[in-house]
Amino acid sequence: MNLLDNNDSDISEMSPVKLGHDPKIDWFHFETKMRSLIQEMLEPVIRRNSEDSQTLKFMETIYDEFKEKHQESDSRIQALEESTSEFAVLDNRINELRGNRKLEDQKISIEFSNFHSDIDQMNMLINQEKEIARSTEIH
């Protein structure tokens, strides 16, 4: 296929050069074709750029929302940790008081036991005194 052949209608339509005539360039036709070609090449790029820009804005919005929720979660976790540590302090204090109460219960138990022993000894002494007093009365 020869590009300079006058019979090829597709080439003669697209070519700004009039084939078979003086090779004068139809600058307006050339410029229009170039603009059309550049526009065809740039439109998808511009459309993609616009879509990417919208997607990026959407992702930034989602990221900001996620960041805010993450900060709220961190604040809640920190508050829970603080209250948990307060509960741990209270629990430790309660356990300490329970331990002290058990020690006091043991001490009281020992004192009651000693008190009962003292009472039993006093009762024995009283009974012995009574026996001695009876035996002296009988004689």
Image (cartoon, grey):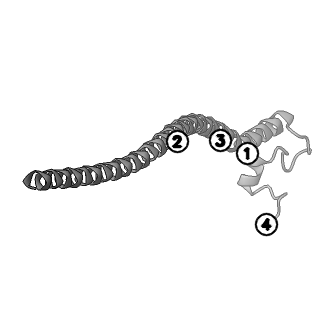
Task: Say which residue label 4 marks.
Answer: 1
Rendering coords of residue 80 (x, y %) = 49, 39
Cα separation, mark 3 vs mark 1, equals 17 Å
Task: Say which residue label 3 marks.
Answer: 52
In this rendering, would 42 be left or right of 134?
Answer: right
The reply to whether discs 4 and 1 touch (Cβ–Cβ < 8 Å) is no
Cα separation, mark 3 vs mark 4, equals 44 Å
Rendering coords of residue 92 (x, y %) = 48, 45
In this rendering, would 91 be left or right of 9?
Answer: left
Disc on the earlier residue, 2 or 4: 4
The reply to whether discs 3 and 1 touch (Cβ–Cβ < 8 Å) is no
Going by the numbered disc 1, the residue's amino acid type is Met
Q: Nearer the viewer, residue 39 or 45?
A: 45
Quarter of the C terminus within the rendering: bottom left
For disc 1, the neighbor class at 10 Å (few under 14, some 14 to 19, many from 20) is few
Circle 1 or circle 2, nearest the eye: 2
The reply to whether discs 3 and 4 touch (Cβ–Cβ < 8 Å) is no
Rendering coords of residue 96 (x, y %) = 46, 46
In this rendering, would 97 be left or right of 108?
Answer: right
Cα separation, mark 1 vs mark 2, equals 65 Å
Circle 3 or circle 4, nearest the eye: 3
Task: Say which residue label 1 marks.
Answer: 41
Disc on the earlier residue, 2 or 3: 3
The reply to whether discs 2 and 4 touch (Cβ–Cβ < 8 Å) is no
Disc on the earlier residue, 4 or 1: 4
The reply to whether discs 1 and 2 touch (Cβ–Cβ < 8 Å) is no
Going by the numbered disc 3, the residue's amino acid type is Asp
For disc 3, the neighbor class at 10 Å (few under 14, some 14 to 19, many from 20) is few
